Amino acid sequence: MSLLQLHQPRISAPVETAHPIELRGVVKEYETPAGSFTALRGIDLDVQPGEFVAVVGKSGSGKSTLLNLLAGIDRPTAGEIFINGTPIHTLSEDQVAVWRGRNVGVVFQFFQLLPTLTVQENLLLAMDFCTAIPTSQRESRSLELLEMVGVADQADKLPSALSGGQQQRAAIARALANDPPVLVADEPTGNLDTANARLVLELFQQFAQAGKTVLMVTHEREISQYVSRSIRLADGQIV
């Protein structure tokens, strides 16, 4: 039986829109000392509710740029990005910060857990910032999420006391803290051994089966058994 089947806190149904993720003619350019560099060139993409999509490609293909745009961390030079119907390319920086907390969970390659807070406090801080979860439910929800990913016994420890695999699973729990409908992950298995990488991929697969929309940037090759489909980027274009 899977971790998700054993310990599954409430996961809301996705918001009813045409597609949780929609990109239309998305272009991203950067100014460098050598001149303008185009990282993405006219990307069109739809991702369905409950899909687990892998974005693959060589370094420099535009994978991480795409993920940063979906999370509202960066902005497109041209084109439109809709997440659950919200045109995030039109939001101000303050608006997108509030929007992200409720709508997109982000998992990073290097975990990005705050080192001076315990594992549980990392989750509670995410809930405090967003206020999507009632105050009375936050402590129990944080422990349920940590139990779901198999690190509840590490809740009172600082991230430095955890292994890399445990830190990544804690980071996944934090990304789910406010029950977002969309989860995006940037090379989430890049610093993990094979066994922990498999656990993370299985968790993402289970989240998609439970109704989340999951998009993962990865170099992993053996992913076909986990994902709904793969999208390959080359030179900033879908191929």
Image (cartoon, grey):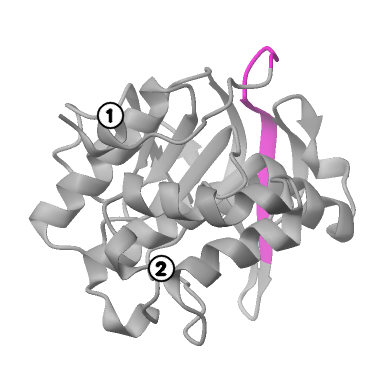
Dividing the picture into quadrants, the one containing residue 206 is: top left
Q: CA distance from mark 2 to mark 1?
A: 24 Å
Which residue position is annotated with label 1? 5
Q: How crowded is the residue under tag 2: few (<14 C-alpha within 10 Å), some, or many (20+)?
A: many
Confirm whether the magenta stretch covers residue 25: yes
Residue 220 at x, y percent in the picture: 21, 47
- Tell me what residue is drawn at x 42 percent, y 23 percent: 210
Q: Is residue 143 left or right of residue 165?
A: right
> Is 177 or 213 nearer to us in this picture?
177
- Note whether residue 191 is visible: no
Q: Nearer the viewer, mark 2 or mark 1?
A: 1
134 to the left or right of 167: right
> Picture quarter containing residue 29?
bottom right
Q: Nearer the viewer, residue 195 or 166?
A: 166
The percent position of residue 230, horizontal first and vertical second, equals 33, 29
Q: Which secondary structure class fits the magenta region best?
A: strand
- Write down the residue under mark 2: 111
Q: Nearer the viewer, residue 162 or 104?
A: 162
| Secondary structure of the residue carrying numbered label 2 | loop
Q: Helix or strand or loop: what does disc 1 sit on?
A: helix
> For this rendering, which residue is in front, 157 or 212?
157
Magenta highlight on residue 81? no
At 37% across and 78% down in the image, what residue appears? 159
